[in-house]
Amino acid sequence: MANTEKRKEERLRFKASASCELEGKIISALAWDINKHGLKIELFKKPEVGTFLTVILDIKPPLKLRGEIRWVDKKGIKFICGVKFVRLGNSEEKRLSELVQSLFWKNFG
């Protein structure tokens, strides 16, 4: 499926190991390009668009973010997926905001 650009804000350059809780299983992922609304993940298993998952970013301390798969593109044996964050609690929103702000200054400061 081709990615049709709909995001309101540009994503910031970011790359981190991650785990995903997807369909009752924990799978390894690579997370990259993030903003306060979502991120991209790279998986070896194809998720369906509309599937809900939890992404656990391997940062200190780990950051757990709930999201929905919005699009999936196949790239070789991997799947690149757009994730829109949903139902984040106050603590997750605060940590995400701090991460995005620090990345902004790292990328553009």
Image: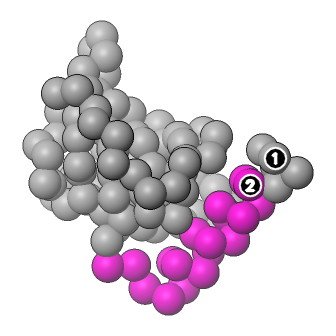
The secondary structure making up most of the magenta span is: helix
Left or right relative to 71: residue 20: right
Residue at the spot 47% in from the left edge and 37% down from the top edge: 30
Q: Vertical placement of 51 versus 13: above or below?
A: below
Q: Position of residue 55 (x, y in %)?
A: 39, 57
Left or right relative to 75: residue 16: right
Residue interval drawn in magenta: 87-104
Task: Decide if residue 82 is in sight here.
Answer: yes
Q: Position of residue 86 (x, y in %)?
A: 31, 71
Mark 1 residue element: helix
Residue at the spot 24% in from the left edge and 58% down from the top edge: 68
Mark 2 residue element: helix
Residue 66 lies in quadrant: bottom left
Extreme residue toward the top, this view: 76
Label 2: few (<14), some or many (≥20) within 10 Å? some
Q: Vertical placement of 95 versus 54: above or below?
A: below
- Is residue 24 found inside the magenta-colored segment of the image? no
Alpha carbon separation for disc pair 1 and 2 = 6 Å
Q: Position of residue 9 (x, y in %)?
A: 51, 55
Q: Amino acid at mark 1?
A: Phe
Label 1: few (<14), some or many (≥20) within 10 Å? few
Residue 8 lies in quadrant: bottom left
Give the labeled residue for mark 2: 104
- Is residue 98 found inside the magenta-colored segment of the image? yes
Q: Amino acid at mark 2?
A: Phe
Q: Vertical placement of 41 versus 37: above or below?
A: above
Task: Decide if residue 28 is in sight here.
Answer: no
Q: Quadrant of the N terminus?
A: top left
Taking depth in this image into account, of 53 and 36 the one nearest to the observer is: 36
Give the labeled residue for mark 1: 108
